[in-house]
Image (cartoon, rainbow, N blue to C red):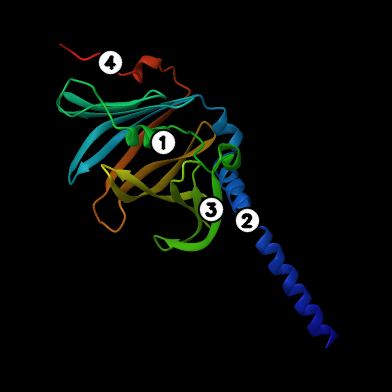
Amino acid sequence: MIRHALAGAAAVLALSGTAAAQTADEIIARSFEARGGLAKVKAIRSLRMLGKATMAPDTDVPVTIEIKRPSSLRLEFAFEGSYSVQAYDGRRAWGIPPRQTQPRALPAEAAKAMAQQADLEGPLADHAAKGHKVTLVGRQPVDGEDAWKLRVTRKDGDVEYHYIDAKTYLPVRVSVERAVGGTRIQSETTLRDYRKIGGYLWPFTLESGASGRTERQRIRLKDVDVNPEIDDSRFAMPAARR
């Protein structure tokens, strides 16, 4: 009887220890540690990422992604002698469509999404200080591998789900629901092929698309430049051409 009681007590203690290690904050801390440490990414002032984007089957175009603190973002796609731009200067979003030259302002919902993407650490880091709420939903397979599922309720009410691999603690998927043209669209981005640049692990393959659909836009990076000099004019909307 005593032996069974002790065994039961040991099991309770073991389960308590496991539960304590499975809090959302613990998972977030281990995830940043697995990538190289939160301090490293916080020390980054700017990023320039070069690669290719698959815009359609068998169609790859060069892409340049630039991010600069506090909240500037520029995506540039090259198209056979021309280019397309989407940018955010910390205040407004603008773009130049493919094979056109005139910049145009983008709607407020685009500025909101790009401001979120310009956050180098993402919403999990210092989430309480940023006004976000993070809760642990549980475990869920992602591409056959077990992952922690975290629900992020942003300060503005937007909800995202972040999936952290249960073995490596690397982020493997982000699912987001946003309004696009008055319609709510659920999209997801899968993160793969992590490589260490500047002492920090970055995903070199990103696949995005609407949830439940097979079509995907794939970005494969070939280079990540940490702390390059990027002039603020790269993010500012240029004057319209006459």
Relative to residue 238, is residue 104 depicted above or below?
A: below
Dot 4: what SS?
loop
The one of 219 and 238 positioned closer to us in this rendering:
238
Of label 2 and label 3, which has the lower sequence position? 2
Tell me if label 1 and label 2 are in contact, CB under 8 Å.
no
- First-in-chain label (4 vs 1): 1
Q: Amino acid at mark 2?
A: Thr
Q: Is residue 49 above or below residue 181?
A: above
Q: Position of residue 187 (x, y in %)?
A: 33, 50
* Foreground: disc 4 or disc 3: 4
> Mark 3 or mark 1: which comes first in sequence?
1
Where residue 8 appears, x then y in whole percent? 76, 79
Tell me the residue at 38%/23% (across/down): 89
Query: Disc number at residue 117?
Result: 1
Give the residue drawn at x 54%, y 51%: 169
Mark sitting earlier along the chain (1/2) = 2
Q: Amino acid at mark 3?
A: Thr
* Label at residue 168: 3
Q: Position of residue 130 (x, y in %)?
A: 56, 37
Disc 3 residue crowd, few under 14, some 14–19, many 20+, Cα 10 Å: few
Judged from the image, the secondary structure of the residue bearing numbered disc 2 is loop
SS category of the residue bearing label 3 = loop
The residue sitting at 21% across, 41% down in the picture is 55
Distance from label 4 to label 1 (Cα)? 22 Å
Mark 2 or mark 4: name the one nearer the start of the chain. Answer: 2
Residue identified by numbered label 2: 23
Q: Is residue 63 left or right of residue 140?
A: left
Residue bearing the label numbered 4: 238
Q: What's the mark number on residue 2? A: none
Q: Position of residue 3 (x, y in %)?
A: 82, 84
Q: Please, is residue 151 above or below residue 65 in the view?
A: below
